[in-house]
Amino acid sequence: MPVSPVRESCALAAPVTAVPDTDRKAASTMRSYHLSPGAAPFGLARREHAVPEPGPGQALVRMRANAVGFRDTLVREADYPLPLAEGVVAGCEGVGEVVAVGAGVSGVAEGDRVALTVFPHWLDGPFAVAYAAQLGGSVDGALAEYAVVAESALVRLPGHLSYEEAVALPLGWLTAWNALTGGRRVLPGETVVALGTGGVSLAVVRLAALAGARVVVTSGDVAGKAGRLRALGAHHVLDRRGDWPAEVRELTGGRGAELVVDVAGSVAESLRAGALGGEVAYVGYRVGDAVTGPPVDARLLFDSGVGVRGVAVGSRAQLVSLMGAVEVHGLRPVVDRVFGFGEVDGALAWHASGRAFGRVVVSHEG
Amino acid sequence: MPVSPVRESCALAAPVTAVPDTDRKAASTMRSYHLSPGAAPFGLARREHAVPEPGPGQALVRMRANAVGFRDTLVREADYPLPLAEGVVAGCEGVGEVVAVGAGVSGVAEGDRVALTVFPHWLDGPFAVAYAAQLGGSVDGALAEYAVVAESALVRLPGHLSYEEAVALPLGWLTAWNALTGGRRVLPGETVVALGTGGVSLAVVRLAALAGARVVVTSGDVAGKAGRLRALGAHHVLDRRGDWPAEVRELTGGRGAELVVDVAGSVAESLRAGALGGEVAYVGYRVGDAVTGPPVDARLLFDSGVGVRGVAVGSRAQLVSLMGAVEVHGLRPVVDRVFGFGEVDGALAWHASGRAFGRVVVSHEG
Amino acid sequence: MPVSPVRESCALAAPVTAVPDTDRKAASTMRSYHLSPGAAPFGLARREHAVPEPGPGQALVRMRANAVGFRDTLVREADYPLPLAEGVVAGCEGVGEVVAVGAGVSGVAEGDRVALTVFPHWLDGPFAVAYAAQLGGSVDGALAEYAVVAESALVRLPGHLSYEEAVALPLGWLTAWNALTGGRRVLPGETVVALGTGGVSLAVVRLAALAGARVVVTSGDVAGKAGRLRALGAHHVLDRRGDWPAEVRELTGGRGAELVVDVAGSVAESLRAGALGGEVAYVGYRVGDAVTGPPVDARLLFDSGVGVRGVAVGSRAQLVSLMGAVEVHGLRPVVDRVFGFGEVDGALAWHASGRAFGRVVVSHEG
Amino acid sequence: MPVSPVRESCALAAPVTAVPDTDRKAASTMRSYHLSPGAAPFGLARREHAVPEPGPGQALVRMRANAVGFRDTLVREADYPLPLAEGVVAGCEGVGEVVAVGAGVSGVAEGDRVALTVFPHWLDGPFAVAYAAQLGGSVDGALAEYAVVAESALVRLPGHLSYEEAVALPLGWLTAWNALTGGRRVLPGETVVALGTGGVSLAVVRLAALAGARVVVTSGDVAGKAGRLRALGAHHVLDRRGDWPAEVRELTGGRGAELVVDVAGSVAESLRAGALGGEVAYVGYRVGDAVTGPPVDARLLFDSGVGVRGVAVGSRAQLVSLMGAVEVHGLRPVVDRVFGFGEVDGALAWHASGRAFGRVVVSHEG
């Protein structure tokens, strides 16, 4: 997506300067946020430029909603395991409407409601180095009013979801789906543990319950959140400051959980909660208030009999199957709070506060 | 299990002669049905003999319930793909209570409510020739008042089930569980087709729904059974005399079902209902009113892109995991009608009538 | 690839008219064969037109070698399980040299020796409807002096192979690779059966031996071919007109083969040769002298305990891994005879004669 | 196996006192080594007692060879991840000849040459808590002149191997087999790394080469061992004191190894040598001169994209398939040095010296 930068606003670390909406030229110019050096390694600079045209095999998407989360904080800190390129459009989570298609496009059409896949080259199969280009990482992302993407990097949305709900699917829910279905799949009746109540973990709770698992979730606020977690499908809510691995073992008759979806890098605890022959689906290490877990004793890795598998979002094919499950069952992601496109700064701050239950969304509708 | 035959009643094909209950010596003798030549290749001869003692590693089980079904008809016709030995105790489905254990037994204890595994040597892993001895086939089975079995051939029952309910688990439900979890596992939102409303198919409906699948079931009596099938988890009930493969394709947007559990040998139809990359879990060919399907065009096997996998009940390890799912979710198999231990003949006839919805059970409680 | 047809030669069914090489304008025009109605449903019409330019993400490949085989005969008879479009460039097997690249291409460069992937949209994962467009089927193929293809539809060749050898890889060897590695993978010491001595089967022999399998191959000319087959890795060569399934069982102590790669549609025989828990990798039904196998008894499908899986070539990712294996071990496909680009007609006739041992190749070098 | 202790020799930590062979009463008494408290947590006490009789389903095996290795050192230090019981017969590696069978035994017969399975209850499927009883751990082991075991805990030996060679199979080779075939199986042409030249690693080299892998092995004595390692199938021999993970990446074009079989607990290095999507098959942590690896950075576990899977020997079914591969290919384990049954002390000391290349064997033939 060749962009013609017109005007650069200030970097996020110094908060984004609100640009009056009237600045925007109706059909011909657009706004976007770009990774730019700032107070943090990467701030977000807002620019304004012409709306691009889709080339052969591409579609132009009018973005309708984005989401922000831990990944964006990691990118800002340049503390991310994938390549980051200065100047690319930021953001990897976006949904919108196809408003134009290039020559030879047959898979999507004008008017289609679509999600952008986070890894546009990862169509199917296991993750590979060749698929590592990520939206808002080394290639232009989704935090923009318009985006031009290959048709193979788009997936149609289930009809029952609003854009604000659907934007949870391509990153957070897909990561949960991959954790649950891409490795050591649990059988109905087996136990899945989700850590905390971030976007991925809430999706794990909902999807694991859908698959018939016994679902355990940890929380720093059991009293405040247990009701909502049970409504999503959790069977047990444990205090994450207690010895939750021991509690998981007790709940499972000493066996442990067949799958622990670890979003926090607390691998040693996850291994202690896991069953012989089980798996830690290691989704990420959280930053902010929670620190990455301590180093892992090499013996524990062996003696636990629990495998460890890293999970990096998922392929386009996995997103298609997730969309199918969401549609068949009428599932709805939990939206915590919606900000305007000019309020990305506030959205990131709200997420960083750790007080959200569900996704923090940026809408283009306002 | 060395048995001491005392008295032989007549073969089943000439119906079982009722033996007055008073014939039975309370603690020291027992009754059992044996495979015996008769009008059909194998009839059932009832004998009476001493209650055996469990040896080292064995348990004595007071049987509480048996089930009868298509398998028993196939055995009677000697039209069964596994070895059958004249004289063995008949029946492969049985649950009961451990009343004594031999030396060195640690896995079960007196008073445990247990199921007998249908293949006592098949503990884990895929089916193999070495595991082919089947209860009531080449080794003594379950249609008896007492049975002596290795402790490794027993699995404890979920606490919430009656014996009459639980007896559906070791054959019918385990076959369904293997079909759903032992091969091409479906993801939540994918489509599973069950054929008809026999015991295996009802279990497929219930367990596939539990795993988040979209469940389609065929029936010869849609009007009469749709309500009960929906209550078990079916999303769609199709007329089995219509072009149900075409209807499955239509329901799935042309794609077809990811898994068809075929109990009837109607492989050509199942292939036409299947999705590219999907699977026919081929559970058995039904006898009686429904004939085995016609030969399968070799091209259809290729062009459909649907794999075929034979399913032969399941291993002990699979039964253990099924029991876990049943217990966690409080599932209850459907019991159609309960007969007394002296009424095996009537139970078989009732099953053969094709009018049952759920399992036909023989209880020892009466 | 939009082509500008200039001149159409006669259809193949009436043999291809040789066009003098001097007709060709060195850098600006090219020749290609196209699917065209003829005496057979599809003949090959030769046309001459301008050499196209690669667009963004595309490469221009100067083709160096093609191969012909059963697939081409099936296409000619319009008896092929995938869509065929009149007028597309024929042929799905081609290797050549990249001579130009379009904007944004980073995966290949001028001078690279490459193979075209048979299914240009099938990059990874299992086969799917969305990947069904095949070279020389519904999209322009490889039987041309130049081809423009997406960079993602190219894979670099191992350095030790000539073009005439390498052209066996993207269809025949990849099909063998998928048969051996994409489903029920055999362990070292397990038994693989290849049927006949066509291109796929020779690759199965070589690759199965590489993977440590015990390799059995059938042949209609044991005396004449056993030596060459053993040199490729075969342990046993059986007469295909004898009861080879029984011989396979005998060679394996009664167990049968864990994998039968069936190129002939002789599914019933393959099932009889297979081991309980084994698989028939069903690669295709041959035409010509060998007829497609008779219908398959539905009971045999069950009683054999052998699964059936259709194999349709393979993904780009599988071709990449195959290339790696070929390179690490310095493997060389067997080339039977090389024809000139103007001799496609003769090449097809030679293949159809059934006398080839190894691939029939069309070279552009002459 | 109830044993009748007759006379106890001194514990191993104080070296085993040689008992004159003439002490032994020919057909009626036997010698065995038992786990006994000593200078180390467990020494080996030699006892003499009556030869036991096989019960129903059991066989009496005249042991012909045992092997000793790291596992025995770990047991001596009571530093073993599985339960250890004082007084049981020591040793988990043993082969011998069936000299008598109990009632109902059909799988083995007098005169059969057999191996004892290390986990007698682990017949098939993945490792489970129910299978954790290990020979010479919590149940009587193999370091004895005679052993009584269930027939299901015996596997017949390939005919071409001596007992001294075959004793390498049930522990060391089976562990290698499980590492190579039980998890992330490598394709021909993919890269396997074995660490060091202990018994497991030598088996990995031989079996990985058999499966067509590119084989890399590390050694502390490249000059002295490279020749023998290449003869076993190694493609590259790297100095284990150098930066071998970096060398592995270089050898693989930056990609890394698809499988690292880690016998040393050097997980951080193994992860650095591994490919994205690859696996560390974590076989054990070595003791003695080599210390267990340092703790593993939780981020490396994620960022490497390499999974970790613990490997604990293997099931009986895996041993059967290994035996098949060994037989089909005429493989021969490497025997380093053979000690007499009275020289267990010396055998352990020789192994602990780290100078062996191949297995250290105890023979009963002398």
Image (cartoon, coloured by chain):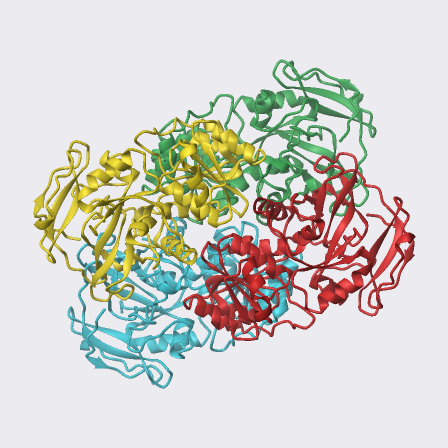
Chain colours: A red, B yellow, C green, D cyan
| Residue D330 spot, x, y in % from top left | 39, 52
Would you place residue A304 above or below residue A5 in this image? below
In this image, A333 relative to D338: left or right? right
| Residue D147 in sight in this render | yes
- Identify which residue is drawn at 72% across, 40% down: A112
- Identify which residue is drawn at 45% across, 69% down: A249
Question: Residue B356 appears in which quarter of the rendering?
Answer: top left
| Residue B135 spot, x, y in % from top left | 25, 47
Would you place residue C147 above or below residue A162 in this image? above
Would you place residue A99 above or below residue D304 in this image? above
Question: Residue B42 appears in which quarter of the rendering?
Answer: top left
Question: Residue A189 appears in which quarter of the rendering?
Answer: bottom left
Could you say which is closer to the camera, residue A33 or residue C326?
A: A33
- Identify which residue is drawn at 39% across, 71% down: D82
Q: How many labels does the image show?
A: 0
Could you say which is closer to the camera, residue A299 or residue B262?
A: B262
| Residue B312 spot, x, y in % from top left | 35, 43
